[in-house]
Amino acid sequence: MAVTQPLDPPGSRPEPGIRSVFLAGPFIQLLDPATGEMPADARAPFDVLIKHFEAQGLSVHNAHRREAWGAELMRPEQCTKLDQDEIRKADVFVALPGHPASPGTHIEIGWASAFDKPIVLLLERDREYTFLVQGLHTVASVEYVVHTDIATCLPAVDRAVDLAVRRQRERSGAR
Ligand code: 5HM
C-alpha cells in the first residue's frame, strides 16, 4: 500500500542554503527600570521568532537572549563588535525597527544593508517609520512585513525571508 507523505505547509522550511538568522530589535527601551529586565510581554515577539526559526533548524543570534533579557547586559565595548561580526556571518537579517525607533537596531540595519544581507523588516501596522527604513528596498534586498501581532504573521515572515534571499541572489548575480 502506498504511503502518502503529508505535505509541509507553505513556509515551513527555510530557503535552501540558509543556515543562520540575526534577529534585531529594541532593547534598552524595553527594560523594566525596576528589574533591569525585559518583561514577559516585551520578550514575546523575540521568543516567538527565535522558536519559529530554530524549529526550522536555523541558528539564531539574538542579543536579547544572549544577554539574558537584560539580566546580563553587555557593555557597549563588548556588544558592538560582537553584533557586527554576527550580522556579517548571518545568512539573513531580521529586525523590528521599533516604535519609538531603536537607535541600536537602526545602526544594525545600516550594517546589514552595507553587508548586502537579505533583510526582513517587521513593521507595526499604522506606525510611522523613518524615510531611510521606508526606502531601504531601493538600495538593498528588503522585504517588509506589516503586522499587528508577530505570532499570527509567521507564514508571512517565512515568505519574506525567502523573497529577500532570492532577490539578494538575483542582485548579486546581476552585478
Ligand atoms: O538602542 P537599542 O538598545 O534599542 O538597540 C538594540 C539593538 O542593539 C539590538 O538589536 C541588539 O542587537 C543591540 N544591542 C546589544 O547587542 C543593544 C544593547 C543595548 O543598547 C545591548 N546589546 N546591550
Image (spheres, rainbow, N blue to C red):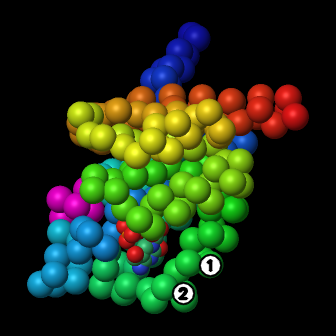
Q: Position of residue 134 (x, y in %)?
A: 46, 37
Amino acid at pointer 2 = Gln
Tell me the residue at 72%/42% (across/down).
17
Residues shaded magenta? 40-44
Q: Amino acid at mark 1?
A: Lys
Q: Which of the pair 155/121 is nearer the observer?
A: 121
Is the Cβ of the residue at disc 2 closer than 8 Å to that at disc 1?
yes
Q: Main secondary structure of the magenta part?
A: helix
Q: Residue furthest front?
A: 131
Tell which residue pokes out farthest to the top in this image.
1
Residue 89 at x, y = what percent? Answer: 70, 62
- Reading the image, the residue beneath label 1 is 81
Which x, y percent locates residue 141?
64, 37
Q: Residue at x 60, y 77 (%)?
A: 82
In the structure shown, which secondary structural element does the residue marked by tag 2 occupy? helix
Q: Is residue 151 above or below residue 100?
A: above
In the rendered view, would you say 124 is above or below 156? below
